[in-house]
Image (cartoon, rainbow, N blue to C red):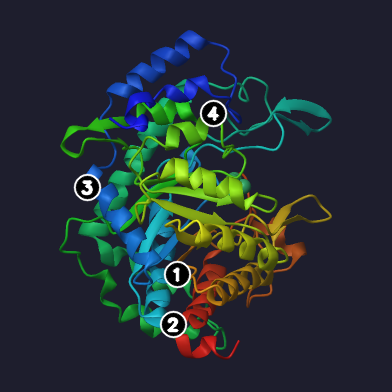
């Protein structure tokens, strides 16, 4: 028996310091809710999780591209037929555009069916001169500026599980029984023939991606940040046939930039599960720490097991990513490299709205691709915050969305997302960057 089997359990993280957790006043109710959650059936299957791990390994070898995206924070109120379909629609369209240009299969992973908890920079916030407990996502409390609604309520963990189950059920039905219902391109594409999106209308309508899939593999995988460990522990099940523990609440989970402390509870929890695990890496992370984390999460150096999701911001990629690449390569650690061009590029407008500039996002991706190429590595995918709707949260793109227009349809409960036009334009731009011939032009 190795050391991991001897000392890890779905609850061993309790012995480690933990951050970013809500403070539940009624501990007994929390315990009761957790034991109910523990008895509910798993949301995904271990075979599906293994399929995704195999895709990650392929992506690391340069044989596939990973497109991970969705809301910053999902809301229970958005668990509707239309909102779920629009998230799948934009992911599917972007995947087709990327696949046609990169000549690689694109694996779609939603930030969906469980992305209900958010890490926050402060436990309190001031609204209208009053201090309130911060909103931590629908899994924990409610957005309204009301002291009662801001209280952490254990019942919401159960609501989260059921909303995830409902979302996933509809996703599976859409993908396997009604894939052509995702082909509603007219709703998405701008009427303007001079728009860069005009060129993709025919491409999308001719794609055979909208035929019913024949295999048993999911067309869309699910993922969320594994933040609330009491909940994640209830979704962690031993699979005897594989002699391994899996988190069966999602296919893939990631560890946020604020919760990946080496000795902390999150790393302890994640080292015991067989799912692919993402590690967010922001500016200032010490490459040696990241290597130690990777060794703890993946002691056998299994390809496809970890994804490093770098999110440095367009101005810092060059120096920070080169240093991390050097450390990971010299330690010979297996990983798939994803780029999150969103979280390092967040700014605030003069009216206090959080936004991101489309060109900063494109630039971070471009720089990331270049730095990888120079080091003999490759950016194997993207991690995006995006909406399938025409929201107005990020500035720029071909519609030249301005800072003044942001308030017209600003809907996010947390960070600003690309809208459907910006998502498609980004797919076109990145698709071009991934074409070997055009790479020479940059
Ligand atoms: C997120 O992905 O929404 C997030 C909070 O990211 P990070 O941990 O990279 O800040
Ligand atoms: Co976010």
Q: How many marks?
A: 4
Q: Residue at x 35, y 63 (%)?
A: 107
Q: Nearer the viewer, mark 3 or mark 4?
A: 3
Q: Which badge, 1 or 4, comes first in the chain's sequence?
A: 4
Is residue 9 found left or right of 323 in the rendered image? left
Is residue 376 found left or right of 56 in the rendered image? right
Quarter of the N terminus within the rendering: top left
Foreground pick, 237 / 36? 237
Quarter of the C terminus within the rendering: bottom right
Q: Where does label 3 land, which residue? A: 47
Secondary structure under tag 3 reads helix
In the rendered structure, are the residues bearing label 4 and label 2 in contact, judged by CB atoms less than 8 Å apart? Answer: no
Q: Where does label 2 land, which residue? A: 200
In the rendered structure, are the residues bearing label 2 and label 3 in contact, judged by CB atoms less than 8 Å apart? Answer: no
Q: Which badge, 2 or 1, comes first in the chain's sequence?
A: 1
In the rendered structure, are the residues bearing label 3 and label 4 in contact, judged by CB atoms less than 8 Å apart? Answer: no
Q: Position of residue 192 (x, y in %)?
A: 55, 83
Q: CA distance from mark 3 to mark 4?
A: 30 Å
In the rendered structure, are the residues bearing label 1 and label 4 in contact, judged by CB atoms less than 8 Å apart? Answer: no
Q: CA distance from mark 2 to mark 3?
A: 35 Å
The quarter holding residue 51 reads: bottom left
Q: Is mark 3 within 8 Å of ligand 1?
A: no
Q: Where does label 4 land, which residue? A: 140
Secondary structure under tag 1 reads helix
Residue 353 tag number: none
From what the image shows, is residue 314 above or below residue 412? below
Q: Is mark 4 within 8 Å of ligand 1?
A: no
Foreground pick, 389 / 417? 417
Q: Residue at x 33, y 19 (%)?
A: 36
Q: Where does label 1 land, which residue? A: 187
């Amino acid at each position: 028996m190795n050391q991991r089997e001897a000392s890890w359990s779905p609850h061993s993280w309790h012995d480690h310091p933990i951050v970013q957790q809500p403070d539940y006043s009624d501990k007994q109710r929390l315990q009761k809710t957790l034991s109910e959650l523990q008895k509910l059936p798993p949301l995904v299957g271990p075979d599906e999780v293994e399929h995704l791990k195999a895709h990650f390994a392929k992506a690391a070898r340069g044989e596939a591209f990973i497109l991970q995206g969705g809301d910053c924070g999902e809301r229970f109120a958005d668990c509707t037929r239309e909102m779920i379909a629009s998230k799948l629609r934009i992911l599917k369209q972007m995947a087709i555009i990327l696949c046609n240009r990169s000549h690689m299969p694109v694996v779609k992973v939603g930030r969906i069916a469980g992305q209900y908890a958010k890490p926050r920079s402060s436990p309190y916030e001031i609204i209208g001169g009053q201090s309130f407990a911060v909103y931590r996502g629908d899994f924990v409390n409610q957005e309204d500026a009301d002291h009662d609604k801001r209280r952490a309520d254990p019942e919401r963990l159960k609501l989260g599980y059921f909303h995830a189950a409902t979302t996933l059920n509809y996703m599976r039905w859409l993908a396997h029984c009604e894939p052509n219902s995702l082909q509603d391109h007219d709703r998405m594409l701008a009427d303007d023939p001079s728009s860069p999106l005009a060129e993709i209308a025919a491409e999308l309508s001719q794609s055979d991606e909208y035929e019913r899939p024949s295999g048993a593999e999911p067309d869309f995988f699910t993922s969320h940040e594994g933040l609330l460990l009491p909940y994640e522990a209830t979704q962690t099940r031993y699979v005897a046939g594989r002699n391994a523990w899996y988190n069966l609440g999602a296919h893939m989970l990631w560890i946020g930039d604020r919760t990946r402390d080496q000795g902390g509870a999150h790393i302890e929890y994640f080292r015991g599960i067989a799912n692919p695990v993402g590690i967010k890496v922001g500016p200032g992370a010490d490459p040696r720490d990241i290597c130690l984390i990777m060794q703890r999460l993946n002691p056998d150096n299994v390809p496809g097991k970890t994804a490093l999701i770098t999110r440095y911001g367009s101005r810092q990629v060059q120096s920070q990513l080169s240093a991390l690449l050097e450390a990971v390569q010299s330690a010979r650690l297996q990983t798939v490299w994803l780029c999150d061009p969103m979280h390092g590029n967040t700014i605030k407008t003069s009216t206090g709205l959080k936004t991101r500039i489309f060109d900063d996002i494109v630039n971070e991706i471009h720089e990331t691709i270049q730095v990888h190429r120079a080091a003999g590595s490759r950016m194997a995918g993207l991690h995006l915050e995006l909406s399938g709707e025409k929201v107005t949260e990020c500035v720029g793109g071909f519609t030249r969305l301005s800072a003044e227009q942001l308030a017209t349809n600003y809907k996010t409960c947390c960070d600003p997302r690309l809208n459907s036009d910006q998502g498609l334009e980004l797919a076109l731009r990145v698709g071009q960057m991934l074409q070997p011939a055009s790479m020479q032009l940059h």
